[in-house]
Image (tube, grey):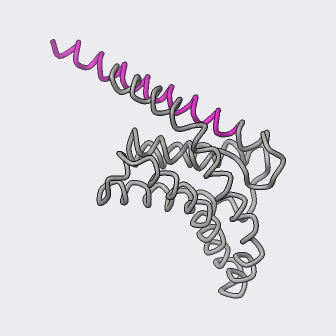
Amino acid sequence: MKARVHSLSRHMQVKRMTLIAMLAALGTVLRVFKIIPIPNVQPVTDLIMIATLMLGIGFGISLAMMIMILSNLLLGFGIWTVPQILAYAVCVLTVAGLAKVTPLKKHFTLQVILATFLGFEYGFFVSLGMSIYGGWAAFLAYWLSGLLFDFYHAVGNFGCYFILYKPLTVAFRHYLQEA
């Protein structure tokens, strides 16, 4: 009996690793090969948000880190890489925290509003991370010069959420039922 439980546990670990690898590959492709030729319009934030809501904070942070590392292997690493990872970690924490204190999981409209907000939150925290390299003046310059791109990110999140929500939630529910 103990061997069977261990076997099931190992099987679930392999399933979880496979899912995160597939989603990280998908997120990387969606980040690198832009569907819409507008800067910062990509469904990565929505993918991470839905994964966090359905599969939890640990899964969301792991997925965000993997997407940033894999995509930066193709796009290039730089002083922005660590702030990008940390900014997505903050976004995941925001989603998970709000899911605990609000009916976020049950209200699609709240999710769309949050996804839109995350475009601005992500940009703010990437800019804040850049202050490490140049102080508050660097933060302010980086943040102000990036507000238009944050707006594009937010609008992209808004639009992409309507496209991604149903197929991802159906897939994640199926995954969770098999767990």
| The N terminus sits in image quarter | top left
For residue 108, above or below residue 141: above
Farthest residue to the bottom: give it. Answer: 137
- Coordinates of residue 47 in the picture (x, y in percent): 56, 42
Q: Nearer the viewer, residue 130 or 40?
A: 40
The residue located at (55%, 63%) in the rendering is 117
Question: In the image, is residue 60 part of the stretch drawn in magenta?
Answer: no
The residue located at (79%, 48%) in the rendering is 75
Farthest residue to the front: give it. Answer: 109
Which quarter of the picture shows residue 32?
top right
Q: Nearer the viewer, residue 133 or 106?
A: 106
| The C terminus sits in image quarter | top left
Farthest residue to the left: give it. Answer: 1
The residue located at (41%, 46%) in the rendering is 58
- Coordinates of residue 68 in the picture (x, y in percent): 64, 49
For residue 109, above or below residue 151: above
Question: In the image, is residue 14 part of the stretch drawn in magenta?
Answer: yes
Highlighted magenta segment, given as a residue range: 1-28
Left or right: residue 1 versus residue 157 is left
How many marks are shown on the rendered structure? 0
